[in-house]
Amino acid sequence: MVQSLVDFARGKLAALEQQQLRRVLVDTERLEGAVAIRNGRQLVSFACNDYLNLSQHPVVKQAASEAIERYGVGSGASRLVTGNHPLFRELEMRLAALKGTDDACVFGSGYLANLGIIPALIGPGDLLLADELSHACLLAAGTLCKADVMIFRHNDLGHLSALLQENRGDYLRAMIVTDGVFSMDGDLAPVADMADLAAANDAWLMTDDAHGIGVLGGGRGSSFMDDEKAAVPLQMGTLSKAIGGYGGYLCASQSVIDLIRTRARTFIYSTGLPPASVAASIAALDLIAEYPDYAGLPMVKARLFCAAAGLPEPESCIVPLVMGEPARTLAASKMLEDEGFLVTAIRPPTVPDGTARLRFTFTAMHENDDILRLAELVKPLKQES
Ligand SMILES: *Cc1c(COP(=O)(O)O)cnc(C)c1O
């Protein structure tokens, strides 16, 4: 019995190994700025989502330390039991203000937020429409909620509209989900137009703005790219990227947030975030509000890189270079590491087959010299692809 389990694991691993798809952990020490230490070597990392380098900011670290001193290291229970330390309220008020909503609800992580929100709002007899490149946790929530799931072609409003026209009438409720900024492609969803389309079809739009908050729209995210705020009723995201810490959130109207707090299972049945994480996010959001120009820096760096490497103008601080097969992508990543740069090779199933890629992320504290040196190394890779 037990042997069959071990055999199963070994067989799976061998198959993954053969396709160059096995993944292993590498100890990585991240220091201030964009420095990462791996295998005893100091590298400049273009592989972190810590876009504003706030995970190492002294003010943020100080806030986390003070929270530990006062409230301890853990929250002790679900927020609905005794885990709701007073810092949560403060953080939720800041998030709601940033996103222009009545209220916000903070979850343990972005993944947990999506797994909690979607099944709390739709279920059997309802319809979920998702962009084909939506983050894995949006698609996982689609399975979990037991609604019928339809996938629309990436950023294709015509396809989405056709699916709605053909199917909306067969379902009680309908929800549309998309990344605001696509995590592996770096492009933006047509959020404002999608919001109009959703409203016209009585469908509820949720954007996952994991890579938008803190860096786009003056730090307010992908719903704030135009003069007028896009009418997205469900703005979800994470505190683990530009905000520098950990945790997920939903910003929405009061009744929706009240419902989520009493019905989302990943909120009810999971322990509240540690006080230090919540305090760190509060401090980070305060810094973003205090220094609005700082939020724009990662985009400046991404533009500099793309111009120097001859790549198209970036839409976010994520820049992909599609290489095709995993082996070629891994070799390119290794070459860059030998030159002192940490750039992750992203392989299936994180991205579709045949689109393995290098994924570069830009942060406020990247040095221009490093960016230009990296661009020179990347140019020939691009010509081969
Ligand atoms: C990272 C990410 C998540 C998950 O957020 P965590 O807080 O890391 O769990 C969700 N959606 C998108 C688009 C992401 O990039």
Image (cartoon, grey):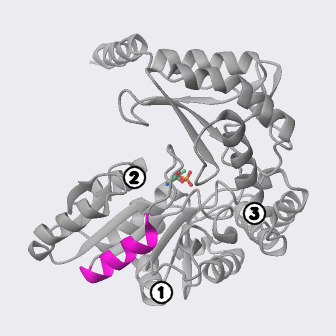
**Looking at numbered disc 2 in the image, what kind of residue is underneath it?**
Ser
Question: Exactly how many numbered labels are in the figure?
Answer: 3
Left or right side of 218 for 155 = left
Other-residue count near label 3 (Cα within 10 Å), few / some / many at <14 / 14–19 / ≥20: many
Residue drawn where x is 79% and y is 55% of the image: 54
For disc 1, the marked residue is 253
- Pointer 2 and pointer 3: residues touching (CB < 8 Å)? no
Residue 91 painted magenta: no
- Nearest to N terminus: mark 2 or mark 3: 2
Q: Is residue 227 above or below residue 362?
A: below
Q: Is mark 2 within 8 Å of ligand 1?
A: yes
- Mark 2 → mark 3, Cα distance in angstroms: 25 Å
For disc 2, the marked residue is 134
Marks 2, 1: nearer the viewer? 2
> Which one is in front, 12 or 381?
381
- What secondary structure is the stretch in magenta mostly built from? helix
Residue 192 painted magenta: yes
Query: Residue 117 location, x and y as percent?
Result: 40, 68
Q: Is residue 188 above or below residue 202?
A: above
Mark 2 secondary-structure assignment: loop
Mark 3 secondary-structure assignment: helix
Question: Is residue 145 among what the camera can see?
Answer: no
Query: Residue 161 location, x and y as percent?
Result: 23, 68
Instruction: Give the magenta part as a residue range.
Output: 190-202
Marks 2, 3: nearer the viewer? 3
For disc 3, the marked residue is 295
